[in-house]
Image (spheres, rainbow, N blue to C red):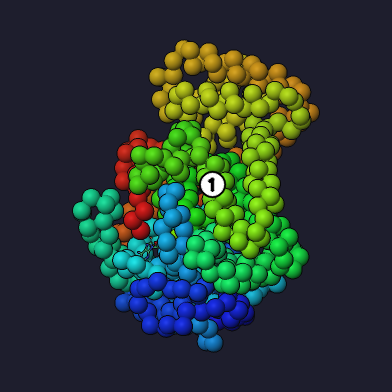
Amino acid sequence: MKLKIKDTFNKLLPSDPVTENTRRQVPKSCFSYVSPAKTKKAEMLHVSKETLETIGLSSKEAMSDEFLKVFTGNQIIPNTSPYAMCYGGHQFGNWAGQLGDGRAINLAEVLHNDKTWTLQLKGAGATPYSRTADGLAVLRSSIREYLCSEAMHHLGVPTTRALSLALSGDEVLRDVLYNGNQAYEKGAVVCRVSPSFLRFGSYEIFAVRQDMKTLKTLVDYTIKQLFPELSRPSKDSYVTFFKEVVERSLEMVIHWQRVGFVHGVMNTDNMSILGLTIDYGPYGWLEGYDPDWTPNTTDSQHRRYRYGNQPDVVLWNLYQLANALYPLIEESTGLEAVLESYKIEYEKRFLEMMKSKIGLVSEENDDAILIKDLEDILQLTETDMTLFFRSLSNLNKNDTLNGLAVISEAFYNPVEVSDSVRQGWNEWFERYAIRLQQETLSDSERKEEMNAVNPKYVLRNYMAQLAIDAADNGDYSVIDELFTLLKSPYSEQPKYEKWFAKRPEWARHKVGCSMLSCSS
Ligand code: AMP
Ligand code: MG
């Protein structure tokens, strides 16, 4: 297996001088050296061909025994020193202290086509940051991370990638609903791939500990290695760096809102400094269009991480990052100005994005109102977000009396849609029809544009759950089918038409489909 190793993180940043793998606070260090645990009987279940190519490996190499061993933690790549990263984080609004890679172990950085990628195993054993947990991951959550991160990539959403999904052969004890019902599940290891796994919490930890030296070292490293287009580290460039992080985070959350992705645990330790979607846990996809929806049962009371709140949470998280960077800059106006611009920029980008979803290109003053009214009416009766926007592109400009018929498949309970709601829809379609007359695109051109931003297929929770249930019984074909389907989420795929459907009723209140916890 030929990988071009180019480690920087563990070469240029301060390491934990203690090399014993014991759980503890790790001061003044960005990482601790740690070896992955050997597993009982590793078995590779799936490999992403696209990610393989991204890091410069062939499908043939992926079939090797070496690949299996390396990406399940049973063998270390020659001349590398695996490590777990130290970070902290704000969890559900409160500072949680040191967290760190509790069950993630970075293997190495590899260079391919002028890009550097960090390879990281998730679920490969305990580290100094494992606190009270075991450092392992179960098959259920690993399938969810593996499928979703690749699906997000193909949707055009900035994300970490997944290279491989393997069974460890070990049994892992979990209490899925945190209600005292522990059970053994199959253990698994996913190899994730990203230019970097640094998070907002990676910087916060040093600011909170008032360790300005390590904070500066890490920020300077970040700018040099990951934001080389910015000028050399200086007080000015720290603000420019922050601005870049703000822009990327904004871009990421706009995409989430576009495709209906709800992250579920947007703690600052789960916010990538590169603006990538990271840490796929109790995430979900909006089915009925409901801004208050969250898939995470742990968050069901306050719904901090509900769909409609994600853009504000990104901003809240950016404030925490700004606080962490402040000691290096000692001047708040620059950071404040950048934070101020987020809201204005978000409104602008959100409007553009929503306009694209309904096929509007030209500028009209009332577009924001038309969209706001659409969001309101979508909530009056349970309406599937994906089906709605995808179907809307079938409307003909001159036949908008037909609006309701075109989108009615998206209603979860068509017979219960009241006359007043129907009336509301008809009025909205009348306004939409008038607005479409101001557009120059033909129906087919508009349809093509809309279908490029409104996915036909997303990884609904019940779909992931079907793949999990089958895999639990040793059948990995659903994983492969969904993986293949989600490579082309915007394309018509007649043979997979069955996945272009509302969530079935059996999945409405099922664990894993509508109710997810952080247990993974
Ligand atoms: P998460 O909510 O998954 O982002 O995890 C928050 C923190 O808990 C991170 O520091 C994780 O590394 C750690 N963590 C989560 N699950 C485990 C586990 N099974 N073993 C060790 N650490 C874990
Ligand atoms: Mg995390």
Q: Is residue 325 visible to us here?
A: yes
Return the residue found at the far right: 440
Specify the quarter for ligand 2: bottom left
Q: Is residue 514 left or right of residue 285?
A: left
Q: In the picture, residue 51 is in which quadrant?
A: bottom right
Q: Is residue 494 visible to us here?
A: no
| Badge 1 density bin: few <14, some 14–19, many ≥20, Cα 10 Å | some
- What residue type is disc 1 on? Trp
Return the residue found at the far front: 330
Residue toward you, 128 or 263 = 128
Compared with residue 79, is residue 467 higher up or lower down, i.e. above or below? above
Tag count in the figure? 1
What residue sits 67% from the left and 55% below the top? Answer: 331
Residue 490 appears at what percent x and percent y?
A: 60, 45
Compared with residue 300, is residue 245 higher up or lower down, i.e. above or below? below
Q: Quadrant of the C terminus?
A: bottom left
Residue toward you, 384 or 266 = 266
Residue toward you, 105 or 392 = 105
Residue 505 appears at what percent x and percent y?
A: 35, 35
Q: Quadrant of the N terminus?
A: bottom right
What residue sits 51% from the left and 34% below the top? Answer: 385
Local secondary structure at mark 1: helix
Q: In the picture, residue 18 is in which quadrant?
A: bottom left
Q: Which residue in the protein does label 1 denote?
A: 316
Compared with residue 119, is residue 207 higher up or lower down, i.e. above or below? above
What residue sits 65% from the left and 69% below the top? Answer: 220
What residue sits 65% from the left and 52% below the top? Answer: 332
Compared with residue 144, is residue 131 higher up or lower down, i.e. above or below? below
